[in-house]
Image (cartoon, helix red, strand yellow):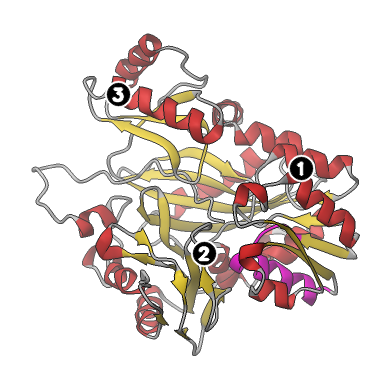
Amino acid sequence: MFRTVLVANRGEIALRVARACRELGIRVAVVYSTEDTDSEVVRYADEAVRIGPGSAQASYLSIPAVIEAARRVGADAIHPGYGFLSENADFAEVCAAEGITFIGPPPEVMEALGDKSTCRGLMADAGLPLLPGTLDPVSSPREAEAFAAEIGYPVVVKAVAGGGGRGIGVAHSADEFPAVYRETRRHAAAVFGDGRVYLERYLQSARHVEIQILADRFGNVIHLGERDCSVQRRHQKLIEETPAPGLDRDVLAAMAEHAVQGAKAAGYVGAGTFEFLYDDSGRFYFMEVNCRIQVEHPVTEMVTGVDLVHEQLWVAAGHPLRLGRRDVVPRGCAVECRINAEDADRDFTPTPGLIDELTLPAGPFVRVDTHVRDGSRISVFYDPLLAKVAVWAPDRELALARMRRALDEVRIEGKGMHTTAGFLRSVVESDEFSTARHDTGLVGRLLEPEPAAAGTRDPGPSQAQPPNAS
């Protein structure tokens, strides 16, 4: 096992990884920006290295700064968490050149799966079902319009280099398409430095389901079941649960086997997630692969008893998987809610500031992953995630009751600060969600409960990218 792991991240995921390392007897080093000088993970780590100012671009996203920190602390491995450099193939390649183990898939695998167009082609060859769309990027407006007409509206335009819910545009008609195509390309070029886009059929009503996989460098791959991530806003997940309620178990089993098949075809190593859309006729379609630990990994851990970060470290150290599929026996139901510093009544505007008073839920079968305490300052520079509240119960009815109770216990006070706890409770107790009749359009319908035309539903962000929260 590793001697020293550098955690190249911040917030709750940095603290969660640091704790896993401590449990395994691994020395923990962390990086931090000037904004995070007094953070919980800096207090917790064996060694901490300041790598830059508050701007993520000058600190957590600076490959030279992170590598220099790794040299300074003598790290033999780097855990990138999620977001920031976690899916950056160039960073993984630099780590390899420096003789530092990157805790994630090999650079060439990450590069192939990170390019959405290349990934679709690879998964199509592996036999995974895809939505009608283009395998290659579309290079001109005329070509794009022709493909859109062939695919049939509505059409989603996606950035090849997209992520974090960005680089997505939906055209519901041929009249809308030119503007959506231009804007998505412009946004992709500005945000990702890559203006290439591809097209897919847009599902009007779907569930977003992901499969958690673990793989080693010896070709062994297992899955640990699915997570339903359909409660989303602006392509960002808000609530996740496992098992996926109200969906055909045989179809979900087939989805999981396709994820294993795709991981083997790609030569995947480590923990990863295969994302699918499940339509109202029971068909499913591959979307993309997340080459990292997911924000919502706690729910899988709670029903399986498997520590996914422990397994990441074990596999990255060169060992074969110590779990077989038969060793993974899910029990009960787990639900997670993400508590953000946002004002739901003002279009979810972030509300940074100083936390004066903090009370987080507790009690039987409640897990809270957080990095905040009384006196923590929530910065304008980073993602507004404050805490992840996850609960377990033998069945979904009790899990939802436990979650409602847990959300009622959340008290986060500070001047001008708001959280999403109250809004999430309204989602959990909504009729659609509690009876598992929801889809990716649920949040939109709750926020704008205007009567839909007969036979139609608000489509919502069904073509969502996974979060790239930092």
Q: Is residue 255 above or below residue 334?
A: above
The residue that mark 2 highlights is 379
Label 3's element?
Answer: helix
The residue that mark 3 highlights is 179
- Packing grade of label 1 (10 A; few <14, some 14-19, many >=20) is many
Q: Is residue 118 above or below residue 354?
A: above
Position of residue 26 measured from the top left corner of the image (x, y, whole percent): 85, 70
Q: Going 26% across and 61% down the picture, which residue do you hit?
A: 346
Q: CA distance from mark 2 to mark 3?
A: 35 Å
Label 2's element?
Answer: loop
Dot label at residue 92? 1
Query: Closer to the camera: disc 2 or disc 1?
Result: 2
Bounds of the magenta span?
A: 7-24
The answer to whether marks 2 and 3 mark residues whose Cβ atoms lie closer than 8 Å is no
Residue 177 occupies quadrant:
top left
Residue 265 lies in the magenta stretch: no
Q: Earlier in the sequence, mark 2 or mark 1?
A: 1
Label 1's element?
Answer: helix
Q: Is residue 383 above or below residue 192?
A: below
Q: Which one is in front, 239 or 244?
A: 239
Q: Earlier in the sequence, mark 2 or mark 3?
A: 3
Query: Closer to the camera: disc 2 or disc 3?
Result: 2
Q: Is residue 183 above or below residue 406?
A: above
Q: CA distance from mark 3 to mark 1?
A: 36 Å
Position of residue 345 measured from the top left corner of the image (x, y, whole percent): 25, 64
Q: Earlier in the sequence, mark 3 or mark 1?
A: 1
Q: Going 35% across and 83% down the picture, which residue do you hit?
A: 408
* Three-letter code, disc 2: Ser
- Quadrant containing the C terminus is bottom right
